[in-house]
Amino acid sequence: MLTVLSLLLTTAPAQAYVDPACEDEAAKGVPEGYSEQAQQDFLLNYFALATTLSPVHSAVPHAAGRGSIGLDVLVIPSLSCKRRLVLNYTKTEDTNKAPVAPRPRAIFSFPKVGPVVFYAGAAYIPPVPLFGTRNVISSGEFGFGLPKEGGFEWGARGHATMMKTVGEIATPFNPDDPSELDLLVASTFGMDVIVGWNTPAVNPYLAVGFTDVSTFFYIGDDGIVSNNKSPYFGLVASLGAQGKIGEHFQWGGELYAAPYNFMGISDEDAAPGDASFAAARLITARLRASYVFGRSSEG
């Protein structure tokens, strides 16, 4: 399903494999601002951010006393050859195995406490082998919303995700070499403020906050543990809408972005272009379809 690729901090062999689709880009040579460390950090941050538990709902996900069980679909944008070429542009990594990640998710809105609706949610991807990897991804959220007269609503939420991927993540230099299992462990947590507008047909919303990324990556080929020197800690934003069809079907969709990493490169010897080259700048789409259950406790 997901694949995240790290870099060996050694010189690549002359015969390292380059995807034919990237041969023209590789022939251009190493671009200005390229950094081995920054490329590694980007890849680790990028795929950790691709599994965050963003809202895909407005400030009040459901009326008080109601909940839903459904499926999120996380779009994972393909990376260009510029991001796939590593080890000074001598080798490509296979980052584009899965265009989407489906994730079961449940949310429940508790009975009102005064004017406030508290809610909690959980999402889980079981360890089913797919695309040559085995993944476990678990997430949770807790938040509140305040619906106002006239349709305006606002709230805040906290969220956290833990993911583990086992598989051939750092590909061998020679595609004919035997596979070696690698291990990626990543976590993300953050907080968002959400504003929305509740109408009978659709609820548009905007969420803005921050997310923190931590990663651990063990490369099975040679026993190296890869060090992320600029783990993402920065802005995230979601612009989307949710709506209902009938009494029990709810849909949602959003554009999700992680535009800027406050951490930067921590290596004192980093080149001037490292920080910009390592910036995640993830922009993607997320969709949700769910069955709504329960009876509203609102009068």
Image (spheres, rainbow, N blue to C red):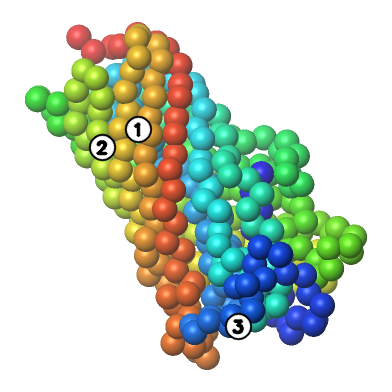
Quadrant of the drawing holding the N terminus: top right
Tell me the residue at 41%/31% (across/down): 120
Marks 1 and 3, the one that precedes in the sequence: 3
Residue 79 spot, x, y in % from top left: 56, 59
Marks 1 and 2, the one that precedes in the sequence: 1
Task: Kindly identify which residue carries mark 3.
Answer: 29
Asked if residue 276 lies left or right of residue 40, the reply is left
The three-letter code of the residue at mark 2 reads Tyr
Residue 107 spot, x, y in % from top left: 43, 26
Mark 2 and mark 1 in contact (Cβ < 8 Å)? Answer: yes
The three-letter code of the residue at mark 1 reads His
What's the mark number on residue 57?
A: 1
Instruction: Say if residue 116 shows up in the picture.
Output: no
Residue 73 spot, x, y in % from top left: 51, 35
Q: Secondary structure at mark 1?
A: loop
Residue 21 spot, x, y in % from top left: 66, 63
Marks 2 and 3, the one that precedes in the sequence: 3
Front position in the image: 17 or 24: 24
Task: Kindly identify which residue carries mark 2.
Answer: 205
